[in-house]
Amino acid sequence: MIITTTETIPNKEIAEVLGVARGSTVRARNVGRDIFAGLKNIVGGEISEYTKLQAESREQALQRMEHDAHKLGADAIVNVRLATSMVMQGASEILAYGTAVKLK
């Protein structure tokens, strides 16, 4: 499956637009990560525990989007975007979405 943030794929022609493919995940912080993050907040620097949590969340959302595109019969997903929103205190959603297409 080709996944791209561009509207087209070089040397490929889009034969059919199948619709929006989407995948999301909602993740919450946990006490262990919060303790380390609190300590890091005192001394400054990157909060690697949260960076790792966000990276894992993005990958899961992208995998779910790809799975959704497969169900639509897509060969590729173009114009892929990521969005995030806070669902509640300490929990956020990451949404991956794009246009599922069939290639010639």
Image (cartoon, rainbow, N blue to C red):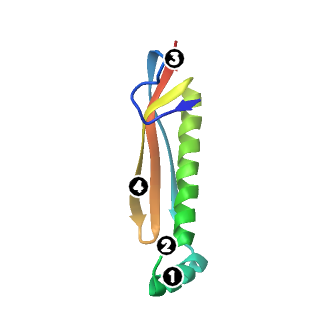
Q: What's the residue at 45%, 62% (across, down)? A: 92
Specify the label residue 46 is tagged with. 2
Q: Is residue 85 left or right of residue 66?
A: left
x and y percentages locating residue 104 in the rendered image = 52, 12
Of the image marks 4 and 3, the number of the one nearer the N terminus: 4
Q: Secondary structure at mark 4?
A: strand
Q: CA distance from mark 4 to mark 1?
A: 23 Å
Tell me whether the residue at label 1 lies in contact with that at label 2, contact meaning CB atoms closer than 8 angstroms: yes
Task: For marks 3 and 1, give the one nearer the viewer.
Answer: 1
Specify the label residue 91 is tagged with. none
Q: Amino acid at mark 1?
A: Lys
Q: CA distance from mark 4 to mark 3?
A: 29 Å
Of the image marks 2 and 4, the number of the one nearer the N terminus: 2
Specify the label residue 103 is tagged with. 3
Residue matched to label 4: 84
Q: CA distance from mark 2 to mark 4?
A: 20 Å
Q: CA distance from mark 3 to mark 1?
A: 48 Å
x and y percentages locating residue 27 in the rendered image = 53, 62
Q: CA distance from mark 3 to mark 2?
A: 42 Å
